[in-house]
Image (cartoon, rainbow, N blue to C red):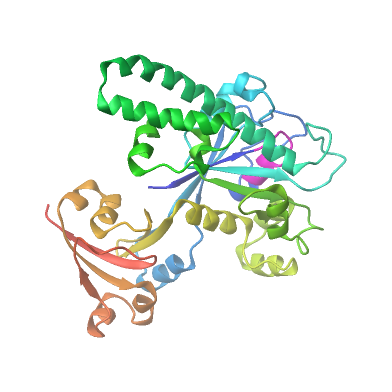
Amino acid sequence: MSLQIGIVGLPNVGKSTLFNTLTESLCAEASNYPFCTIDPNVGIVKVPDERLDKLSELVKPEKTTPAVVEFVDIAGLVAGASKGEGLGNKFLANIRETDAICQVLRVFEDPNVTHVHGKVDPKGDVEVINTELIMADLETATKRESALEKQSKSNDKDILKKWAAVKKVKSILEQGKLVSELELDEEEKEMIYDLHLLTDKPFIYVANISEDQIKNFNAEAKAKELGVSHLIPISAKIESELAQLPISERKDFLADYGLQDSGLKRLIVDGYQTLGLQTYFTAGPQEVRAWTIHQGDKAPRAAGVIHTDFEKGFIKAEVCKCQDFLDLAGWAGVKEKGKMRMEGKEYVMQDGDVVYFHFNK
């Protein structure tokens, strides 16, 4: 599995520039006019992970395969998109296919880059985006409620339960709130899953700031001001310059701005945390590879990410911590020092596990 993040926002907030720098590509045109991104640009980037690099240096496999994140740059949203304004429904359809929504909010001032509303107002940007997503979801929920109301005449218990769950969703949307704010039990969540509601997705918020703002920007205070859970400050301009540098020079470049990590890494880490994801590794002479799973996944489910046959025929897993694997120079070392464990079907995978699965073919 891989993580797919949709990059959204109003026109001219820096979405395409951010996409270009994150993917170190120039496939998304960045221009000073709305809708320069007509179709969604997709970029697949590797997840930065020093553990994978060190494992590869030790094992020296034929190939090294990182975990990946898919970024989707979607055309700018404007007020009325849910009713077809701008690129309207095309935009909203593209968002439905992503795992999380990254809202890019313009905080930088630049008289040469026109703001669609005539002024820099990140709080207003959030309100416009959320309102359009809410209105789109309300239309979806209303249609489903109407259909279920007709079906409810059969007094089918499952239909009645689903109808009640959809009415609950519709009610909170009518209050102008996100579906993610609604408390639903597991059965109710399953009943509304096929609606693919936009406001039920996890949100990540990025503040696109200038070079001058980067050192003194208070992300926590700004997030509180905007009424969002958290905020990742990223300067698309700095990231653009960083992408042009040799890898050996990037650490010093970031340090000059008081940064430890690139915007890409901070965004991916936040995405993993927001979606409850983690990484485990397989390491052998043919391949060293990072695999993405959900926190709480047990060993058979993790094995199934490699191949469904691994989950179906799961027998046991040889497991050790990544640091032990590195310190003791591989499988032979961890086995000799008693750092390798044999785990069964109930083992809950931990971030950074190095694993060898045994299964029935």
Where residue 300 appears, as percent x and y from the top left, is: 23, 56
The residue under the point 65% across, 64% down is 250
Which residue is found at the position 39% from the left and 34% from the top? 193
Left or right position of 5 against 333: right
- Give x and y (percent) for residue 2: 42, 47
In the image, residue 85 above or below residue 333: above
Residue 262 lies, in percent from the top left, at: 63, 60
Task: Say if residue 3 shows up in the picture.
Answer: yes
Q: Is residue 247 magenta?
A: no
Name the residue rendered at 70%, 69% in the picture: 255
Front residue of this view, candidates 353 and 170: 170
The answer to whether residue 284 is visible is no
The extreme bottom residue here reads: 337
Tell me the quarter of the picture where residue 56 sits: bottom left
Which one is nearer the viewer's eye here, 89 or 244? 89
Relative to the observer, which residue lies in front, 17 or 64?
Answer: 17
Residue 95 vertical placement versus 109 (above, below): above
The reply, left or right, for residue 291 in relation to residue 137 is left
- Magenta region: 9-19
